[in-house]
Image: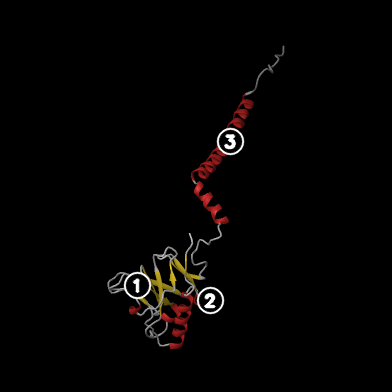
Amino acid sequence: MSRKLSTNGFSIVEIIVIIFVVAALGVSGFFVWQKTHKKETTTKSNPKTSQTNQDKDTSTEPADPSDGGKYLAITEWGVRFPLPENMRGDVTYGIAPVSSTNHYSTSFEVGKIANLAESNCKLYAASEGTGLEGGIGVQLIRSPEPVPASEGIGSPIYTSKDGKYYFYAITPKGLCSGDEQAELAADDALMAALKDIAELTN
């Protein structure tokens, strides 16, 4: 007499396969959920980055006040002036108080002049240790009040929009390098550029 096998239900192999498939779906679903959750958290926790990127796209003012080296920006004073093409990337500055006054002076170093043999046109620490002075000799003076004519620095080349500061450009009193022609050309170029000084916009 032969026995009939019961076909009601699953065999052990079928049950194991079903458990394996369900587990695989659960694990992969968990990883997908975790990845999506991390992206949402990062975006929510950093809305400023997204806003900043939008602002950069719509802003007409360059983030770099030197506009890629076209200007020398004196950020401490909130001003800038255009540099001649042959001086872009070659001019640095230092600020120091002018002794016995309430003015401050910006001195400029032009790399191609400062690096000449026998040149003394580099910026150096002020004697009081309160900034940098020296350079090529051209100076930009900032004063909170008009400077009397007796000081011999001429008329202001610029007055701040709020009327708090007066700016004066001073020509050098002597030469600091062995190449008089190159130094005088750099002096003249800086003096001409300073006439186009303007305030940085926010």
Q: Quadrant of the N terminus?
A: top right
Q: Position of residue 71 (x, y in %)?
A: 49, 70
Residue 29: mark: 3
The residue where tag 1 is placed is 132
Element carrying mark 1 = strand
Other residues around mark 2 within 10 Å, as few (<14) / some (14–19) / many (≥20): few
State the CA–CA distance, disc 1 to disc 3: 63 Å
Taking depth in this image into account, of 85 and 24 the one nearest to the observer is 85
Tell me the element at label 3: helix
Determine crowd level at label 1: few under 14, some 14-19, many 20+ residues with C-alpha closer than 10 A.
Answer: many
Q: Amino acid at mark 3?
A: Gly
Against 57, is 197 above or below?
below
Q: Residues within 10 Å of mark 3 (few under 14, many from 20)?
A: few
Q: Position of residue 62 (x, y in %)?
A: 53, 62
Label 2 sits on a secondary structure element that is: helix
Q: Residue type at mark 2?
A: Glu
Residue drawn 43% across the image and 88% down it = 180
Report which quarter residue 24 is drawn in: top right
